[in-house]
Image: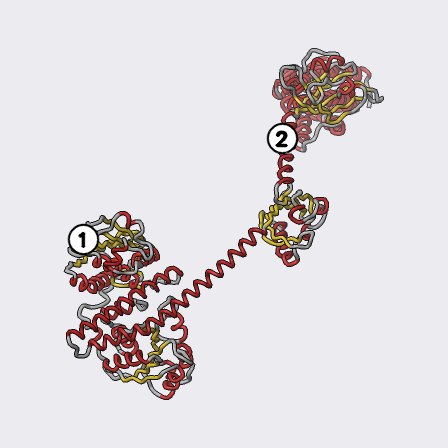
Amino acid sequence: MILDPQILLKLAQNISLFALVVLAYANIRRHLGYFGRVFEGLALGCIFGSTAVLSMIVPINFAEGVFFDGRIISVGLAALFGGPLAGGTALVIAGSYRYWIGGIGWGVGLTSLTAAFLLGASFFIGLRLHRKRLRFSSLLLFSILSSIFIPCLTLLLPAPNLVVTILHTMVAPLMIATFLGTVLFGTMLLNEDQRAQLQRELAEQSQTLRLIINSMGDGLIVADSDGMFRLFNPAAERLAGVGSVDAQPARWPEIYGLYQTDGETPLPMEEVPLFLALHGQATDEVEFMLRPDRAKPGRMISVSGRPMLDNAGQVRGGLVLFRDISERKKSELALRASEERYRFLAENVTDMIGRISVMGLSLYVSPACRDLVGYEPIDLIDHNFIELIDPEDVAKVKDLLACLRDGAVARAAAVYRMRHRDGRLVWVDTTFRLVLDDSGKPSEILYVVRNFNERKEFEDRLAAAKDQAEQASRAKSEFLAMMSHEIRTPMNGVIGMSGLLLDTPLSDEQLRFVRAVRESGEALLGILNDILDYSKIEAGRLELEYIDFDLPALLDSVATLMRPRAKAKGLDLTLMLAPDLPASVISDPARLRQVLFNLIGNAIKFTERGSVTVTARHRNLGAGQIELRLDIVDTGIGIDNIAQGRLFDRFSQGDPSIARKYGGTGLGLAISKQLVSIMQGEIGFSSEAGHGSVFWFTIRCPVGAAAQPLFPADSPPAEMIEPLVRHRVLIAEDNHINQLLIVSMLSKSGYQVELVNNGHEALSAVQRGNFDLVLMDAQMPGMDGIEATRAIRRLDSAKATVPIIALTANAMSGDRDIYLAAGMNDYVAKPIRLPELLAAIDRYLKPDAGRLSREAADSQSEPAA
């Protein structure tokens, strides 16, 4: 292979043209890049394309129309460094010129240009896809491929003789020139590219640093070794008034108003942090006052300074960083003042205030511990809080503190005993509160301990007084129960015997006497019932029995029973029911009847002429509830204004003259008011002396099933109901008068009776005989009725199921439950009335049990009356 020196010279001339493009490339990278990548790519393509055209002006000719130049290197490097846009632009420019000059090798020339473009663009795209930057290794590989592949395209020339000539004379120089030119020219471009990239990164870092400095809330000042400010940020201008005018270090305290923390004493130059930094001394968190205008309050700032050293360790300048801490200092002062106030309170209040760790060690104890437990605060610090607590209460307090530590509760309180230094026990009431740290974990426990001795003593006295009051209440209840029994027993004989006597032939005078005795007994029994009812209500032992009953029938029965009394005084008693009044309601019919008897009885009692009118109506409350209202209107004597204020007081009447003229205990209205209140209602009246009165009351109750009247109009009186068979009845009664009365009543009613005197005899009689029913007195000597009933129920035979009805003079609330618990089926209160007794027996011996006469049912619904 022959190397022609002339060819190498021309090749060197082509390659030398490439040096011109390096300067243009560097300027484009530095300046034109700001206009966008498209503009930059087009500019680079034009430069590289122009270089290729210039290289073709001085080509290496092999034959007519066949020559070689540096255009391939230009187009390839344009695509490698500038991308497809720059390479394509260079390809268009160089290819157009090559096509214009023509010759036998123009086709091969265009092919080689296109191949150089594709190779360079492939390298560029591959590096971008792998997110890599162009390095010398990539450039070297590109040069090797260009020097091997592109010269081989000369084989495409149409003249074989020419191909042989070129291969013989030009292959080696062409490959060497292509490789060296690409490496040399590419290295220069790569260096410029890296230099431009480094400048851009430095500019970006500088811009970022400037943004950071300008965005800082803290002031920053950088000064050179002469004290001249070379850099400061907006925060420094705002906080310290630093400007573009340089000031000598000696004038800093005067210009910027540097004062010590008191705001009055000038800061010495030797204590200025920037001055110290320029002299090689670092400072941290130095606090002083900036007060350039003496007429205005200054700013408290915190300053840190550092010297700037060169590589030799010489001071070349200094910088300071400072921030405004005025608000923080105000907060610290306020917090300190607040702490002092709270400490003053903690140390002067009588309650012992303290802090303990989560492990129970005392961290702080207020001086009040001297009076409470006899210790000095220093004696309790670092000691376990539990050591002060009485051993019997330690477990309770430990459990409470454990709940606080575990986060189950945030606050807790406990009453327990602490042991005083002198050994005595002190009752205390303590409130604990858990304190959490910044991470939300338990940090410590605050507590406030208050002396509880006086309150504890008061509670003990109150408990003792309560016990005494309960004992007194029980004693009163027992006394009333005893008096009820003792009074009702003879009253049973008086009323019962007078009733039997009325069934015998008597003269008119005897009839008046017997009726007077019976009426007097009934009056005495009414007084006794009022006293017992009020005692039950006062003791809270009155219980209502809610049942579904026929409301119109109940109102009609009350009016029917009260009508004879009104008629005896020449009064009209009228009952008026609203058309939409419910047929049945759910409430306590006995207590409703009792209130009506009291109010209608009073109306009749205090009315000499005219009438008494009872009206009933209701108001729907929704959800099946109604408010029932009853008004009792009379034309009686009325009530004056003075008496109205105490009308519902117990044992109270209008005035003493009324009590003397009309009688009564003064309990009726008080009992009615309490009963209405228990039934969730209200009671009231309106009256004027001499013009009658209107008494009204309301109760709230559910609407019941629309039942038929409880007592059919054709029901015969109880006295007319005869047993269908002669049942055997055992009577257990120790009082002779009551024995005579009950035997007489049942014998006349057709029952076969057997009499025993106590519980033992009753048990024996049941064991040996066959009885259909037992009437058992509750209180008898030896074995009483309750014990006898229990013994009967324990029998193994069928006799254990015989119905047992209690006969009792005990009318207090709760007695019925005692009888039923003992095994009794029912009870009848003394004094015994024949309708009540027959009705009770009828419920257990008649096949149509429960069908009673109206009078018997009315009486039975008030067993305590």
Furthest-bottom residue in view?
768
Provide the secondary structure element on which disc 1 rests.
loop
Q: Position of residue 598 (x, y in %)?
A: 26, 60
Q: Secondary structure at mark 2?
A: helix
Q: Is residue 805 above or below residue 345?
A: below
Of 48 and 655, which appears nearest the observer?
A: 655
User: Which residue position holds label 2?
Assistant: 334
- The residue where tag 1 is placed is 635
Give the residue type that dot 2 points to.
Ala
Query: Percent x, y for residue 863?
Result: 31, 69
User: Closest to the observer: 762 or 476?
Assistant: 476
764 lies left or right of 40: left
Displayed quadrant of residue 651: bottom left
Q: Nearer the viewer, residue 632 or 529?
A: 529
Residue 285, compared with residue 586, is above or below; it is: above
Location of residue 131 by image quarter: top right
Q: Is residue 299 visible?
A: yes
Asked whether the viewer can see residue 204, the reply is no
Q: Nearer the viewer, mark 2 or mark 1?
A: 1
Point out the tag, 2 or 1, that comes first from the N-terminus.
2
Badge count: 2
Residue located 37% across and 60% down the image: 537
